[in-house]
Image (tube, rainbow, N blue to C red):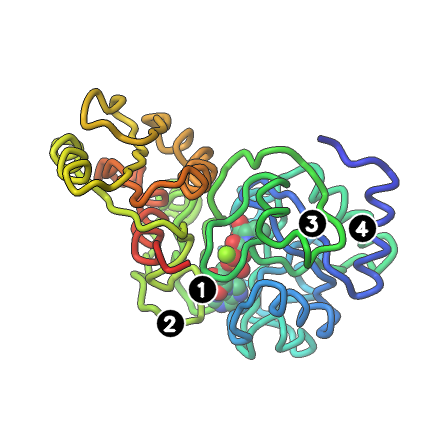
Amino acid sequence: MTPSDTDYARAIELLRAGELVAIPTETVYGLGADAANPAAVAKIFAAKGRPADHPLIVHLAGHDAVDHWAEQVPAVAWELMETFWPGPLTLILKKQAWVPDAVTGGQDTVGLRVPGHPVALELLRRFAAVAGEHAGIAAPSANRFGRISPTTAAHVQEELGDQVPLILDGGACKVGIESTIVDCSRGQPVVLRPGHIAPTHLEAVLGLVPLIETATGAPRVSGSLEAHYAPQTPMRLVGSERLLDFLNAQRHKGGRCGVICHSQPPQAGFPHCWRMLPADPVGYAHELYAALREMDHAGVDLIAVEALPTEQVWAAVADRLRRAAAGAGQG
Ligand code: TXA
Ligand code: MG
């Protein structure tokens, strides 16, 4: 799973030439381009079919590059970087004037992250060595717009294989859902997208409970669109206690149902296929997107997902499931 020197060299060559490279991160795979090259960044939008006003995250090799991209970086943002970078946290900061509109969607802020995956970090370091010490790689998740984020190189191949000249294989992503996004550009930090780094973790650093922006559907954060991260097969969230009745009703209608559960395997109701995910949020997040993809390939008419516990620790995966259900079945 470790790319060779030749793979890295080819990746750098492509990035320098304004081409795309798919890269593993600890959250999900990203579709990367030289963040300082607007023509290269435009290729990301074309490949994904993503609206041009959706800003991208710039990935950096380390904290030292932050001031090159952002200005007026508040003390709390530095504290968050110290604690959580490299890692699954994206900070929204006031951008430097030179940062291309192609990256920021024309906004006055920029999203920055130092990823915690050794392959991503190695690539970023090698890129900075040749493109300038502050060089960054702009990368959204390497899926077609609105679809399930890829957590393996094979998923990227399946989503965008014909559009990406190189996919660096770094194995299965450890976290499995996208980074937590915290906006530090407007005074008190606001969580724009929940993730592996939870409000309680942030609170321990900030000394106060961060505000959480509830989804508005505004394109400022594409992950905040109601329908997102979605499989092609229709999908329903079904409470544990209703699952058996639900499966029986589907069977009665002649529908082939796939089940994603976490408390116990479906012991009756005759699902066409089922997948049991770990009953803890970290394990669940790690496997969720692969499970949704597997269901999409299983030839079922409907995916029934056992509804998650309502506790705060499940918030990030519950958020992804809710959006997946909202966008499912449109492909
Ligand atoms: O874990 C991740 O964050 C992955 C990996 C590849 O790093 N990337 C990812 O990118 O999920 P993407 O583009 O699928 O989602 C990034 C989110 C989007 O919802 C985007 O709108 C938001 O970050 N974002 C980026 N810059 C922003 C800004 N200046 N203001 C508000 N939101 C921003
Ligand atoms: Mg995405």
C-alpha separation, residue under disc 2 versus residue under disc 1: 8 Å
Q: Is mark 1 within 8 Å of ligand 1?
A: yes
Quadrant the C terminus occupies: bottom left
Asked which secondary structure carries label 1, the reply is helix
**Residue 60 position (above or below residue 38):** above
Say left or right for 112 vs 321.
right
Say what amino acid the circle numbered 4 marks.
Ala
Q: Residue at x 45, y 64 (%)?
A: 222
Asked which secondary structure carries label 3, the reply is loop
Tag of residue 62? 3
Identify the mark nearer the N-term, 3 or 2. 3
Tag of residue 222? 1
Say what amino acid the circle numbered 1 marks.
Ser
For discs 4 and 3, the disc positioned in front in the rendered view? 4
Say what amino acid the circle numbered 3 marks.
Gly
| Circle count | 4
The quadrant where residue 245 appears: top left
Q: Residue at x 88, y 41 (%)?
A: 6
C-alpha separation, residue under disc 1 versus residue under disc 3: 25 Å
Say what amino acid the circle numbered 2 marks.
Ala
Marks 3/2 in contact by CB < 8 Å: the verdict is no
Q: Position of residue 261 (x, y in %)?
A: 29, 30
Q: Is mark 2 within 8 Å of ligand 1?
A: no
Mark 4 sits on what residue?
11
Is residue 75 in view?
no
The 10 Å Cα crowd at callout 1, few under 14, some 14 to 19, many 20 or more, is many
The quadrant where residue 134 appears: bottom right
Q: Position of residue 184 (x, y in %)?
A: 47, 62
Q: Which of 210/45 is in front? A: 45
Q: Is mark 3 within 8 Å of ligand 1?
A: no
Asked which secondary structure carries label 4, the reply is helix
Mark 2 sits on what residue?
218
